[in-house]
Image: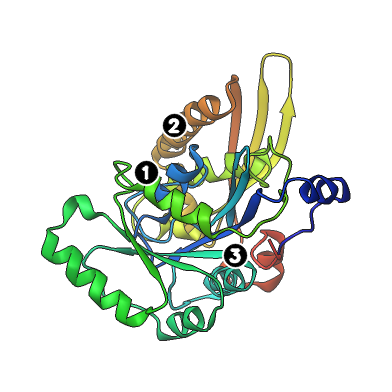
């Protein structure tokens, strides 16, 4: 939810009514490019990107500041029909995002026609700007783009359309300009030097989860929760202890691999990526533990942050 600007900022704002600030939430079906677009808009790799669907589990905020604006972007899980409690919590993030947004970016892939009627109904009931973002136009013909535009404009008649390719930055400046002009006049909600409201531990866990998605097949990555158990900074080194929670003993065996080969590769690739992200040498310890059916356990959902208001 939004947090109110500080009193001193309100005073400064009264002297500078040209400043705009607001919350811009990205929603859409799985694998339409929300995380790629989020990273383009923020200019940093905050959201993990893989070819697999449902890579985003939590609501991730990225903050972009200019002299006369502040945009707080939120990358959200893809819209889906929940199969277990964890996905129910993920969809709660999506529904909550429609309540606290100043601008909604509804992202679709060029050629995509599937939608959830409930979400479309809620979007049409909103009294805030909606920008329909048609992504991946670099792979589409003019006819496909026109057909996609017509289909979605019929569903979201109040929306304004911007056609982009998040992968190669096509029309991203146009989209940013549209966002800025739709933001309300407001002082900033966060200090101007902040990039995100998420702690470092969160991004460490996301990097490890990205490697899980890339290195393991089928259901394995979706059955794993990554928890950063310890984070100790020394002069020339950061020691990070992590636990991978899985649902079954068979999943634990697959993650570890024959004679530990799979988890060793995971650790090597994750450590390299974390060192690049933090700019410091890392000692990374990864252990694997079994928590039976954790994705359907309310207490564990709370422990892992899926039912917190963020």
Residue drawn 63% across and 60% down?
A: 184
Residue drawn 76% across and 58% down?
A: 3
**Labels in figure, total:** 3
User: Do callouts 1 and 2 mark residues in contact (Cβ within 8 Å)?
Assistant: yes
Regarding residue 71, the answer to whether it shows in the image is yes
Looking at the rendered image, the quarter that the C terminus falls into is bottom right
Report, in whole angstroms, how far the alpha carbon at label 3 lies from the one at label 1. Answer: 38 Å
Report, in whole angstroms, how far the alpha carbon at label 1 lies from the one at label 2. Answer: 10 Å
Residue 267 at x, y percent in the picture: 49, 33
Residue drawn 49% across and 55% down?
A: 179
Looking at the rendered image, the quarter that the N terminus falls into is bottom right
**Tag shown at residue 102:** 3
Circle 1: is it few (<14), some (14-19), or many (20+) Cα within 10 Å?
some
Regarding mark 2 in the picture, which secondary structure is present there?
Answer: helix
Nearest the eye: 297 or 165: 165
> Residue 236 sits in which quadrant?
top right
Disc nearest the viewer among 3 and 2: 3
Residue 155 at x, y percent in the picture: 34, 81
> Residue 230 sits in which quadrant?
top right
Vertical side of 114 occupied by 189: above or below? above
**Tag shown at residue 269:** 2
> Residue 102 sits in which quadrant?
bottom right
Report, in whole angstroms, how far the alpha carbon at label 3 lies from the one at label 2. Answer: 38 Å
Regarding mark 1 in the picture, which secondary structure is present there?
Answer: helix
**Tag shown at residue 215:** 1
Residue 249 at x, y percent in the picture: 51, 58
* Drawn side of residue 306 relative to residue 173, left or right: right
Circle 3: is it few (<14), some (14-19), or many (20+) Cα within 10 Å?
many
* Drawn side of residue 42 relative to residue 282, left or right: left
């Amino acid at each position: 939810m939004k947090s109110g600007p500080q009193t001193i900022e309100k005073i400064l704002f009264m002297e500078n009514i040209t400043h705009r600030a607001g919350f811009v939430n990205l929603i859409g079906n799985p694998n339409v490019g929300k995380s790629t677009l989020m990273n383009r808009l923020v200019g940093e790799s905050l959201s993990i990107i893989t070819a697999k669907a449902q890579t985003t589990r939590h609501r991730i905020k990225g903050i972009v500041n200019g002299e006369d604006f502040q945009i707080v972007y939120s990358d959200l899980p893809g819209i889906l029909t929940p199969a277990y409690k964890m996905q129910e919590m993920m969809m709660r993030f999506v529904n909550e995002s429609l309540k606290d947004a100043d601008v909604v970016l509804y992202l679709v892939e060029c050629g995509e026609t599937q939608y959830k009627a409930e979400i479309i109904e809620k979007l049409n009931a909103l009294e805030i700007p909606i920008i329909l973002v048609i992504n991946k136009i670099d792979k589409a013909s003019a006819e496909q783009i026109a057909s996609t535009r017509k289909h979605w404009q019929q569903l979201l008649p109040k929306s304004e359309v911007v056609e982009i390719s998040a992968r190669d930055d096509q029309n991203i400046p146009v989209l940013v300009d549209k966002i800025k002009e739709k933001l309300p006049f407001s002082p900033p909600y966060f200090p101007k030097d902040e990039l995100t409201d998420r702690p470092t531990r969160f991004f460490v866990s996301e990097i490890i989860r990205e490697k899980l998605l890339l290195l393991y097949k089928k259901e394995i990555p979706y059955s794993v929760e990554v928890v950063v158990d310890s984070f100790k900074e020394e002069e020339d080194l950061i020691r990070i202890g992590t636990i991978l929670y899985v649902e079954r003993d068979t999943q634990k065996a697959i993650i570890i691999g024959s004679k530990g080969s799979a988890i060793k590769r995971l650790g090597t690739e994750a450590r390299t990526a974390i060192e690049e992200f933090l700019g410091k040498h890392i000692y990374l310890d990864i252990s694997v533990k079994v928590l039976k059916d954790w994705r359907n356990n309310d207490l564990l959902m709370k422990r892992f942050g899926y039912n917190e208001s963020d």
